[in-house]
Image: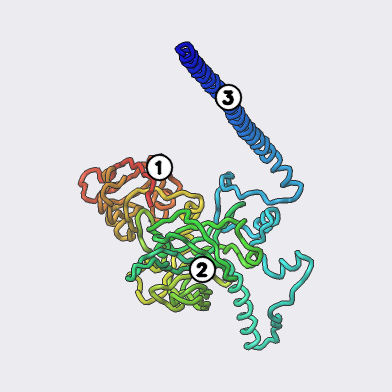
Amino acid sequence: MDKLKKKKKTGEAAGKLKDEENIIIQEKEEDEETSVIQEQIKPWHKRKFKKVLSVVGFSLLAGIIFGIAARFVFKYSDGIISKIFGLNQPYDTTTSQPPVTINPQPEQNKDQNSTQGITIGKSEDEIAKSNGSETKPSTVPIVSDGTALSEYRQAMEEMRSKTENIRKGVVNIEGITSIINWLGETIEQSEKTLGIVVAENTNSLFILTYYDKIKNAERIELSFRSRNSYTVSLLNFDESYNIAVLTLPKQALRQEDLGTIALLDMGNSDEIHAGMPIIAVGSMDGENEIVEYGIITSDSSVEYITDAAIGIFTTNVEHSEDGEGIVADLDGKVIGIITRKLGSDIMPNVNKCMRVNDLIKVAEKLCNGENRVYFGIKAGNIPLWVLRENNIENGICVNNVEPSSPASDAGLRKGDFIISVNGTMISEVKEFSDILMDSDESSSLMIEVYRVSKTQDPKFTVVVHPVKRNN
């Protein structure tokens, strides 16, 4: 019996041991299976990541190579493609241009315009003929029959024709500024004025206008008689003359405007005289464009500004404080520009004009991006009796010396007479102004001075170094 119990216990122990061995074997198999699964999963994730990374890297490399190749092709094929298909080349503002001159010759302009593909200054009939067609004349030519009325009609028709040519060079200018109204809203406020087309080069048209109307503008718009509007740039200005120059790229012009634009031809205002018939085109009432025929009533006034003098003449055309425009002779050549700023002491209720001869040099400088040099005096012409009283033959009188100016630094005073500049005798302020126009900030001007207050040696010489004018 004891042996049987002992055997039974031994069997139970052996069974437990076997069960434990089975459990250990099962756990070991499970661990091995788990390990196999992990070994199978981990390499799969690594391979997938490497594959995705290699695809992305290859795509980036291919994109870079393609971009470089495309850039190379576009750069070196653009000129060839443009020549083959006749594409327009981009407008190049950096191309060097010869100096701009005012009062160009019509025949030279016609040749230049044909090579550039821009038609400026041709009539509608000329454009139609160049295109192989002709237009009917807008008016029937008047044939004189010898009567006074017929002669008058013929003369008026010729003046109307000249006026139409002048109007092609007159444009509308609008200076636009953003302001905030009393409701806190941002609105645009405009200031309207006139401009005249005075010069051109290969790339641009140059428009002379009134500076005070556009000096505060954020944007400047120009419109021709077609009412087409263009944004123009302020190139330069001279506040003393109250003039500014705007530029308009030729390539911006629309086809319908090409035949309606003309460069205004400048006349010789030194030959004008009282009683001379004139044509006035502009906004003499400050609002609407008006054409008037009249005469010059006075031609002997001068307005003295800093370092210059401007001849002023008056006419019998309508006057307004806001009046603007140009005055031309019967040949259609501009001889004056109506002024609102100058000549205030000359019969205040009369139309006044600046002589064009006194504007051409400064306008050309502005067109070429240059300024007058700054000397710093206001001078006037000396009457003959004053010259004789001081035993001198020529000179101009210094009426004012501006503080901290080159003239002040050199020792010039109010009341001094300037007799010569660099050895050239000076008899009028215009002669002095012309010398300054041809000078630059690197110039040294030898000024011979006569000072009335000096009892001994009233004549002496000073050196003035003009500086660049900061408009």
Q: CA distance from mark 2 to mark 3?
A: 93 Å
Q: Which mark is residue 172?
A: 2
**Kind of residue indicated by mark 2:** Asn
**Kind of residue indicated by mark 1:** Glu
**Residue 269 position within the rendered picture, expressed as x and y whole percent measured from the top left:** 50, 64
| Callout in the foreground (1, 2) | 2
- What residue is shown at x 71% (from left), y 66% (from top)? 127
Seen from this angle, which residue lies furthest top?
3
- What residue is shown at x 64% (from left), y 60% (from top)? 106
**Kind of residue indicated by mark 3:** Glu
- What residue is shown at x 21% (from left), y 47% (from top)? 454
Which scheme is used to colour this image of the protein? Answer: rainbow
Does residue 441 show up?
Answer: yes
| Callout in the foreground (1, 3) | 3
Q: Is residue 75 left or right of residue 180?
A: right
Dot 2: element: strand
Indicate which disc, 2 or 3, sits on the residue closer to the N terminus: 3
Indicate which disc, 1 or 2, sits on the residue closer to the N terminus: 2
Q: Is residue 308 left or right of residue 87?
A: left
Q: Is residue 208 left or right of residue 428?
A: right
Residue under label 1, please give it: 441
Dot 3: element: helix
Q: Is residue 99 above or below residue 323?
A: above
Q: Is residue 198 left or right of residue 218?
A: right
Q: CA distance from mark 1 to mark 3?
A: 96 Å
